Amino acid sequence: MAATKKVKSLPKADVEAIFARFSEIEPEPKGELDYVNAFTLLVAVVLSAQATDVGVNKATKRLFELAPTPSAMVALGVDQITELVKTIGLYRGKAKNVFALSQLLIERHGGEVPADREALEALPGVGRKTANVVLNIFFKQPTIAVDTHLFRVSNRTGLAPAATPLAVELQLLKVIPPQYLLHAHHWLILHGRYVCKARKPECWRCAIREWCRFEPKTPAPKGA
């Protein structure tokens, strides 16, 4: 991920104001991946790398009907998993990872998804970002999963200007008030996905524009 133009970090009061505004607008933000339990969430997040949530949801509808547990996924086998997720980018490698992580969940964790980052990252196809998503959404831990949207928003606004996803994550964990940490991940990702877009941020309808350091602000299109 390439950082955007370097900006100064926001003062503490502005950071708090931003998350207070997010909380006011959407007190209980939700992720957009479909899942039925911790295992299917983990699989969905693994499949979502370099793919859209909409595309993943279309592919996993039938997959999760057939295999909502690690044992059922192993029973499907790599070939059938591959066939079911072939509409997703990099599907062959992802199918192999889903099969392998299902095996390891059975062998190491009794078929249960561990609520521990180190254990999650030891599974095939699971990196820090994926682990943080699962820990945050299912296990309600105050983790920050830095994807391209969150990385961009953090740098543009001045919330956590840093050169790497890990540096952004650690900075956010320091500056976000504790009462907002659980939902911060979703607020920032959804803001980047729908408002603070990569090519042309829609500043004219941004709820946090008064604190954001991004300049020049994008003007509203004619007729908007």
Image: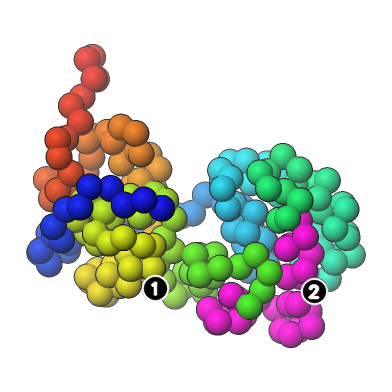
User: What amino acid type is highlighted by mark number 1?
Assistant: Pro
Give me the residue at 89% from left, 65% from top.
75
The part of the image, by quadrant, that contains residue 44 is bottom right
Query: Which of the two discs, 1 and 2, labels the residue nearer the N terminus?
Result: 2
Compared to residue 101, the image places residue 85 above or below, namely above
User: What amino acid type is highlighted by mark number 2?
Assistant: Gln
- The way the protein has been coloured in the rendering is rainbow
Q: In this view, does 50 lie to the left or right of 169?
A: right
Q: Can residue 218 be seen in this view?
A: yes
Give me the residue at 28% from left, 36% from top.
201
Q: Tell me the chief SS of the magenta region.
A: helix
Give how far across and how far down residue 22 sits, in percent. Answer: 26, 53
Q: In this view, does 187 lie to the left or right of 57?
A: left
| Residue 119 magenta | yes
**Dot 2: within a 10 Å radius of its alpha carbon, few (fewer than 14), some, or many (20 or more) residues?**
many
Q: Name the foreground residue: 38 vs 11.
A: 11
Outermost residue to the top = 223
Compared to residue 105, the image places residue 54 above or below, namely above
Give how far across and how far down residue 12 sits, in percent. Answer: 12, 67
Give how far across and how far down residue 24 sits, in percent. Answer: 24, 54
The part of the image, by quadrant, that contains residue 103 is bottom right
Report which residue position mark 1 lands on.
142
Whether tag 1 and tag 2 are in contact, CB under 8 A, the answer is no
For residue 76, the mark is none
Magenta region: 95-121
Q: Is mark 1 on a helix, strand or loop?
A: loop
**Quarter of the rendering occupied by the C terminus:** top left
Give me the residue at 28% from left, 48% from top.
4
Give how far across and how far down residue 158 sits, in percent. Answer: 19, 55
The part of the image, by quadrant, that contains residue 205 is top left
**Dot 1: within a 10 Å radius of its alpha carbon, few (fewer than 14), some, or many (20 or more) residues?**
many
Report which residue position mark 2 lands on.
103
